[in-house]
Image (cartoon, grey):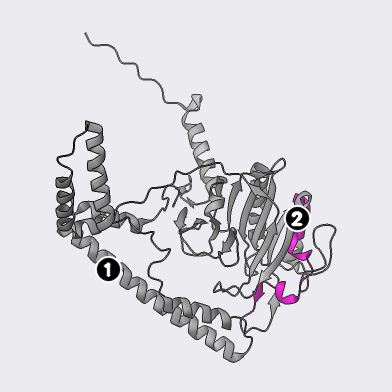
Amino acid sequence: MQKNEVSVIGVSEVRWKGQGDIRCGDYTVYYSGGERAERGVAIVVHKSVVRSVVKKIVCNDRIIALKLKAEPVDILIIQVYMPTSEYEDDEVEKVYDTIEDILQEDGRCVTNSIILGDWNSIVADDPYQNIVGSHGLGRRNHRGQMLIDFCERNGLTVTNTWFKKPKRRIYTWKAPGDWKRHQLDYILVKHRFRNSVKDVKTLPGADIDSDHNLLVAKFRTRLKKIIRYQKRRPRWDLEKLYAQRQSVQETLEEKLGAIEGESGNAEAQWNNIKECMLDTISDLVGKVEKIARKPWVTQEMMSKMEERRKWKNVNNEEGRRKYRRLRNELKKATDRTKKKYLENICNAIIEFQRTGRYDLMYMKTKEQGGKENHGIQNIDIEDSQGNRIVDQRQVLKIWENYITELYDRPNRPETLEVEPGE
């Protein structure tokens, strides 16, 4: 995302369980999955965008949405992963119905709705009203017509069919074996905000380790920051302080002895003592350096990633063979170095516990925990028939019905009359 200057990205087939959000470096991942590690969707946003998020809508393992505060109008981003051709049309219609429910509730008035994802549909290059342009790819299929009907009902346009590009900048999916290319991923916007889209294209050179190409749209908009975070002050390196406590103590005693005879009021004396302490700690200990995004990533791994990226679009047998080899080598190297890094962290935590340094043990454990929000994970419930429900809208509906029945006056239990004792 940083290399291609992308602030928001939608991801399909995340294959994570439950729902939640997790921070990774400068980015926050909002994800929604099911009970099993299948399907799943996510929206990844840069820290500059997180401040504009006013609402997150977690539906199921095929739909997730974010609402952003922006100018001149708010933005609703919906990430979709449509069923493949193996599923019946009824399953596809259910997904469309859920999207329309979100549009009716959160995309009303002048909100600019942006719906993106893997639609598993082909709308082709056959223009249709102000919905489909003449710069698509392939031959329209039945699912493509369903997508067009959905756009017509909700006043949407398929943006990546309106910009003239070479075919390598149009196709979004490459069939196994590198024989056929299709346009299955689309970015939809409302008709009235179509002019806010400045460009849409795929980036076949982006190394995302997928058979889909990264589809990027450039919008003209300005986000509003609704939450201001206080900048955290750097912390002193407590581990280094503990390791050098003897030299710190000796240096501090020497400096304090030098100013012991100085005169002045209480405030002046305190300032001198504080200055001695800060100077000593700064010289011998220092502040904790900013933790790397992924500390286990080595220069060798970065070189392999760059080499893998170069072979990604070499469309011959040798290119595909080298790309697969580099991908496997990189995965093994990542697993190996990450495992070693975590083992060292665990050994350090055990040593802190053994020596009674529970402050360092807690700090080190907290660093590994990250900023994950567990508050909305695995929110599910059973209905009256015992079926487990994951869809958040259905969960809320079940609670609504339960509360209504519980406090419905005709069904309330009779009040017991207790006679006062003598």
- Asked whether residue 59 is in view, the answer is no
CA gap between label 1 and label 2 equals: 53 Å
The quarter of the picture where the C terminus appears is: top left
Q: Position of residue 214 (x, y in %)?
A: 62, 68
The residue under the point 52% across, 53% down is 47
Please give the label number shown on residue 344.
1
The residue under the point 61% across, 57% down is 79
- Between residue 60 and residue 42, name the one nearer to us: 42
- Disc 1 to disc 2: CB gap under 8 Å: no
Corner quadrant of residue 25:
bottom left
Q: Position of residue 122 (x, y in %)?
A: 73, 68
User: In the rendered picture of this protein, how many numbered marks are placed on residues?
Assistant: 2
Report the side of 190 relative to 43 (left or right): right
Residue 103 drawn above or below residue 338: above
User: Which amino acid, by three-letter code, is at mark 2?
Assistant: Cys
Report the side of 28 relative to 92 (left or right): left
Mark 1 crowdedness (10 Å alpha carbons): few <14, some 14-19, many ≥20: few
Residue 118 drawn above or below residue 397: below
For numbered disc 1, what is the local secondary structure? Answer: helix
- Asked whether residue 339 is in view, the answer is yes
Region rendered in magenta: 148-175
Mark 2 crowdedness (10 Å alpha carbons): few <14, some 14-19, many ≥20: many
Q: Is residue 264 magenta?
A: no
Viewer-nearest of discs 1 and 2: 1
User: Which amino acid, by three-letter code, is at mark 1?
Assistant: Asn
Q: Position of residue 407 (x, y in %)?
A: 47, 28
Report the side of 159 relative to 252 (left or right): right
For numbered disc 2, what is the local secondary structure? Answer: helix
Provide the residue designation for mark 2. Answer: 151
